[in-house]
Amino acid sequence: MTDYYEILQVHPKADAEVIRAAYERLRDRYAPERLEGAAEELVALARQRRDEIERAYAILSDPQRRAEYDRERQESAHAEPKTKLSPSSSAPIVDDDELIDFRPLPPARRQERPPGFNPQPYLSPTHKTSPGRGRAMQRQLPAWVLPSLIVAASTFSIVLGTLISTAVVAPTTLTQPTATVVPPTPTLREVLDQFEGQVIAAQQVVGQVPDNPNAWVNLGNALFDSVVFVREQLANGDAETQRIYQERLPRWLEAVDAYRKALELQPGNDVVRADIAASLCYYGLDTRDPKRAQEGLAEAEKALAAAPQDARVLLSHGICLIAVDPPQVERAIQQWRLVLSIPGVNPGLQLQAQILINEYSQ
């Protein structure tokens, strides 16, 4: 059956506010006005995505319909074999809720999840089979998994406690009709608090495993996402959003520091170098600091020389080209057009490239 949680890029245990925020973000991403003049196949793809998003939200935003969907989804899961094969090995993975990996999903980075993305990954089942295989599990899992699970478990317990206390204090709300209830749109501050939780969790993991490059990449991603989200809201012209973004501008440089630490531990990672470039160029562009923008462009040129056909590298390089003084708009558009011409590129990256082309072609 169709996985509406995967379509909205949320966990099956996500609350109404998280689902609403994901819906608003995706609906804006695939808005028709963003793709005026785009290729016919991209317009058709965006239309298809919007229909899927609307259909998924119509189900998950209605408590009764979501409960019915969850019941059917659970029955469908029970009807399948109780074991699955990991895509990376032939070892069976037990279909057990205790084995679900509750760590936060990797940030979407304003991109569509790739085909086959698993929104509900499983941990190794070795801790369920034999008490003498604990060491084997430690060898199979990365070092950062355990602290990540501790952080996730703490967060889950806090949320659970909040839900229980709410139910005790206001039990009468459970008896009210829910068929027409529409979850309120989360405020900017509420969404920012969610990003703050991701940053704090990533910082704690880095503190536990400072020699793991993935931990530093995740911290860089959390910092990047927390500030780029505010930047994307600036078009609304809200004075409060402007003030918050000014306060968060230093986070671009904090993200750069995290990415550089990851690059020290994992030299040759061109995508991380491209993320360094984008962070520097966004900072230089919005603070009118040409030296930072030039520094970012130099990093982008290095990444491009090593990976000239990587879509994310091309996107970051184009961002840096419009950040320098004077802006190299035509060359940036050429880079983004290359993203559209590369076979097999993730459709989300192609849509992002098309949106940038439309924005800077005006």
Image: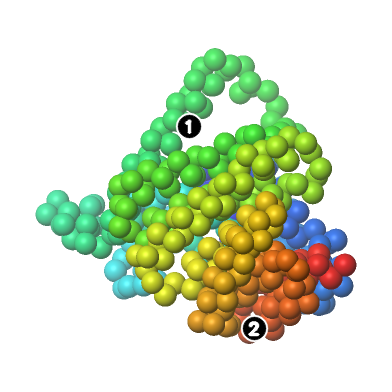
| Residue 204, visible in the rendered structure | yes
Farthest left residue in view: 132
Residue drawn at x 23%, y 52% is 128
Callout 1: helix, strand or loop?
helix
Quadrant including the C terminus: bottom right
Viewer-proximal residue, 143 or 161?
143
Label 1 crowd bin: few (<14), some (14–19), many (20+), radius 10 Å? few
- Residue in the picture at 63% in, 84% down: 343
- Rendered residue at 14%/51% (across/down): 131
Q: Residues within 10 Å of mark 2 (few under 14, many from 20)?
A: few
Tag of residue 159: 1
Residue 342: assigned label: 2
Q: Picture coordinates of residue 344 (x, y %)?
A: 61, 81
Using the image, determine if residue 243 lies above or below residue 234.
above
Q: What is the secondary structure assignment of the residue under circle 2?
A: loop
Q: Quadrant of residue 179?
A: top right
**For residue 311, above or below residue 210:** below
